[in-house]
């Protein structure tokens, strides 16, 4: 049951012609160099409006597209499991769109403050055996491209995706496989700051039986070759990564389609 709410050499005997040719070459190189320098300094002017269009489109997605577009009822994870095994996930619950406060952990919310948190959309999925559950979220921000690029650089530079105190919160739902999916059940997670859209994508996974996880791991560690932790052995890093990747791909496709200007 589900809860839903893009030159030949010039002969030396003709010095005048030689000088003329040299002058032409120098002028030509100057023009080419000037054009290249202009492009390097100013960037591709056509790209800037396109980026703004994509941001405008993405910023409105939380209320302008069907929930099934952002969070499909089923997700195919061909090769997404441990050892390249195929996975499949079923959506078991969708949360109403919500404010950021109370939906995000306070420290994570504080970290996202520079980009201005607008709305949060969440859904929870279960694997085919209902032994694991994963909450995936889309945080829509108020930032422009420069702001998202700066936040992305900070997350990478400071390795914020590895900090357990920045783990996203779960979305448990009574009467589903995620009924006991609380903070103590979080096993693996990922947070990805997009730069082509004002959105942060996250996912957090855990066991559906309510067991406590004492040493959660970010997906990079939980999916590393030879990892022996409980989240790694259970494939929970692959669960979080696989679901986040597919929701992110769908978001990118939706933004690209919506940002294409009519002929």
Image (cartoon, grey):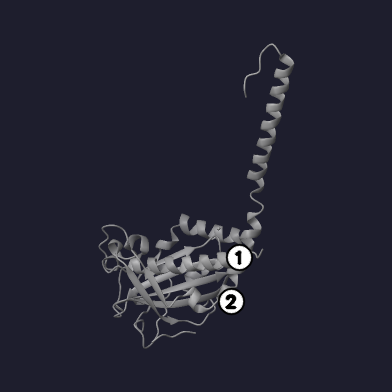
Give residue 263's quadrant in the image: bottom right
Tell me what residue is drawn at x 52 percent, y 66 percent. Answer: 253
Expressed as whole percent of the image width and height from the top left, the position of residue 132 reads: 32, 75
**SS under mark 1:** helix
Residue farthest top in this picture: 13
Expressed as whole percent of the image width and height from the top left, the position of residue 85 reads: 29, 65
Decide: marks 2, 1 in contact (CB < 8 A)? no
* Residue wearing tag 2: 64
Give residue 180's quadrant in the image: bottom left
**How far apart, in angstroms, are the residues tagged by discs 2 and 1?**
13 Å
The vertical placement of 164 against 150, above or below, is: below
Residue 143 appears in the rendering: no
Q: Count residues near mark 2 (Cα–Cα under 10 Å), then give few for <14, some for 14-19, many for 20+.
A: few
Closer to the N terminus: mark 2 or mark 1? 2
Expressed as whole percent of the image width and height from the top left, the position of residue 155 reads: 48, 59
* Residue wearing tag 1: 259
């Amino acid at each position: 049951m589900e809860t839903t709410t893009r030159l030949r050499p010039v002969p030396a005997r003709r010095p005048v012609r030689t000088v003329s040719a040299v002058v032409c070459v120098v002028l030509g190189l100057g023009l080419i160099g000037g054009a290249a320098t202009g492009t390097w300094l100013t960037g591709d002017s056509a790209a800037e409006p396109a980026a703004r269009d994509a941001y405008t489109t993405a910023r409105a997605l939380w209320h302008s597209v069907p929930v099934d577009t952002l969070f499909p009822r089923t997700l195919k994870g061909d090769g997404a499991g441990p050892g390249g095994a195929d996975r499949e996930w079923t959506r078991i619950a969708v949360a109403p769109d919500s404010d950021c406060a109370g939906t995000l952990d306070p420290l994570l919310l504080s970290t996202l403050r520079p980009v201005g948190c607008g709305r949060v959309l969440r859904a929870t999925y279960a694997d085919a055996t209902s032994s694991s559950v994963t909450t995936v979220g889309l945080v829509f921000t108020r930032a422009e491209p420069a702001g998202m690029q700066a936040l992305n650089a900070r997350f990478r530079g400071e390795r914020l995706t590895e900090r357990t105190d920045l783990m996203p919160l779960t979305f448990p739902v009574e009467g589903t496989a995620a009924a006991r999916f609380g903070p103590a059940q979080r096993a693996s997670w990922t947070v990805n700051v997009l730069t082509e859209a004002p959105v942060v994508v996250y996912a957090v996974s855990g066991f559906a039986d309510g067991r406590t996880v004492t040493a959660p791991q970010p997906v990079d560690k939980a999916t590393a070759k030879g990892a022996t932790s409980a989240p790694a052995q259970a494939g929970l890093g692959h669960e979080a990564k696989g679901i986040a990747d597919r929701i992110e791909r769908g978001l990118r496709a939706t933004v690209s389609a919506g940002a294409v200007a009519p002929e």
